[in-house]
Structures are given as structure tokens and as C-alpha cells.
Image (spheres, rainbow, N blue to C red):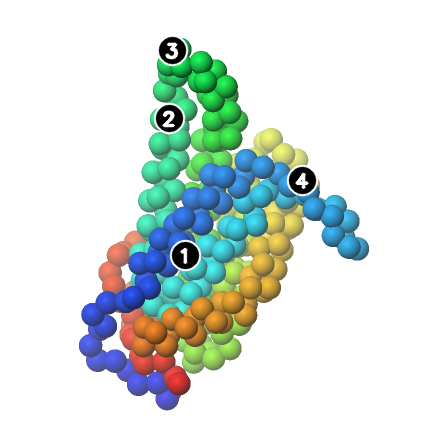
Amino acid sequence: MSASTTAARAPGFRYYDLLVGGMVAVLLCSNLIGPAKVCTVTLPLLGALTFGAGNLFFPISYIFDDVLTEVYGYSRARRAIWAGFAGLAFASVMTFVIIGMTPSPEEPFNERLQPALEIVFGASWRIMLASMLAYWIGDFANSWVMAKMKLWTNGRWLWTRTIGSTIVGEGLDSITFYPIAFAGIWSGQTMLKVIAFNWTMKVLVEIVLTPVTYAVIGFLKRREGVDTYDEHTHFTPFSLRDEGEQRTPRP
């Protein structure tokens, strides 16, 4: 390989923390705000399509995962995934706590606010559990495939890694979330249709945004002066070790 290996680890990254923050913010919005609304759009030839609003921006969290894995390596993407999981868990617990607290009868606005909070944020424990577990499985699968394919392709054909990892990660996310959240509530046929549609939609978002992913990854590799290959990384998700072999990116 023409890229040279960096012997010493870089003292720090300019944009890593910002990317982690952005990934966590997108994840929280897609899980707490998006699922509260079901939208319908009418497209030429396809007709009316109905979907949860969270599907508009949840795939962006996978793009963050792709960028983090490609530039900084699996171990640093792993740290970001755990940060997102912790943020989602904390938000879920606080949601139950706030909604469960007795509203003050001295504030008349609470009569309108409490029912609204329960409708928008009062998801069942099944949906919360399904959301966290599906995110954890899907994002780790996405990052693992991304890192492994980078080794298999010797760093070439980035588009195969971004799309291939999304197909696997979003697929596992969908087949984990919906059965846990809605088994016994939805019919099997409805569940299969929803899984297929949402999986397809999320992968299409990744494909459409591939040029943006290319631009962001190229920018970060140049500015950070690093391109990480996980040749000696331990691929267990149960670690926060900062691993990954850093190499100077190709010009």
C-alpha cells in the first residue's frame, strides 16, 4: 500500500468530538421527535407513501458512523456508538421520569401540557427497549462491516463500503426494532411490509447522499492528516480502547 504508517499516534483530532456530538444529536432527534409523527408524501409513479418522520434523518446517524469508521477507525467509532447509546438511554429514563411526575395543579397550563407530553414522548417500554437495542446492534454491525471491507478492498471503492455497511446495519436495525416493538400488535404481513419499506428507504438515503459522504471523508482525511486501518484492532463492541493503525492519507 502506498500510504505510509504513522508510528506515533496523533496528539488529537480537530473534528472528532464535533462528529460524535452531531451523531448523538441526530440519534436523539430521530428517536424522540421523529417517531411521534407519521407522514405521507405523493411521488410520481409510486403514489402515496406513508412513513415515520424519524426515517428522514435517522439514516444520517449511519452516515456519521461511516465517516467516523472510515477516517478514525472502528475503535473510535465504537466510542461514538456507546456515547449515542448512553445519551439515548439517559433521554429514555428521563422521559419516563418527567412524564411520571405529578403535574402541579396550581399551574393551569399543565392540564394541556401533560397530555401532550404523554402523546408525543410517552412511548411504551417496548418501543424504548427496541429502539436502543436496534440502534446498538445496527450501528456496531455497520461499523464492523465498514472497517472490515476497508481491509478487504485495500482502502479502495469507498462507495461499496458505505452502501454495503448500511445495507447490513439498517437491515439488522429494522429486523430487531419492529418485532420487539410491535409483535402481537401488528400482523406479520404488516410488519414485513414496514420492515422492507423502511430498510429500502434508509439505504436509498445513503445512496443519494454518497457524494456528500465522499466530500466529508475527503475533507476530514486532509485536515486531520490521518487514514485509519483496523488491521490490529480488537473488534469487540465491549471496549473503549483507542486502537487503530493510523496512516497518512493518499494525496
Residue 106 - label: 3
Where is residue 242? Give x, y as percent: 25, 63
Q: Are marks 3 and 2 in contact (CB under 8 Å)?
A: no
Q: Are marks 4 and 1 in contact (CB under 8 Å)?
A: no
Residue assigned mark 4: 190
Residue 141 visible, this angle:
no
Chain-order first, disc 4 or disc 3: 3
User: To which quarter of the image does residue 240 belong?
Assistant: bottom left
Q: Is residue 184 left or right of residue 151?
A: right
Chain-order first, disc 2 or disc 4: 2
Q: Residue at x 63, y 44 (%)?
A: 51
Residue 140 - label: 1
How far apart marks 2 and 4 lie (CA) works out to: 33 Å
Question: Callout 4, which amino acid?
Answer: Thr
Where is residue 158? Give x, y as percent: 49, 74
Question: Callout 1, which amino acid?
Answer: Phe
Residue assigned mark 2: 98
Where is residue 18? Give x, y as percent: 34, 58
Chain-order first, disc 4 or disc 1: 1
Between 113 and 162, the residue placed more toward the observer is 113
Q: Residue at x 70, y 46 (%)?
A: 41
Question: Callout 3, which amino acid?
Answer: Glu
Between 26 and 140, the residue placed more toward the observer is 26
Q: Residue at x 39, y 50 (%)?
A: 24
How far apart marks 3 and 2 lie (CA) works out to: 17 Å
Estimate how packed mark 3 is, as few (under 14), some (14 to 19) or many (20 or more) residues with alpha carbons within 10 Å. Answer: few
Estimate how packed mark 4 is, as few (under 14), some (14 to 19) or many (20 or more) residues with alpha carbons within 10 Å. Answer: few
Mark 4 element type: helix
Q: Residue furthest right?
A: 45
Chain-order first, disc 2 or disc 1: 2
Question: Callout 2, which amino acid?
Answer: Ile
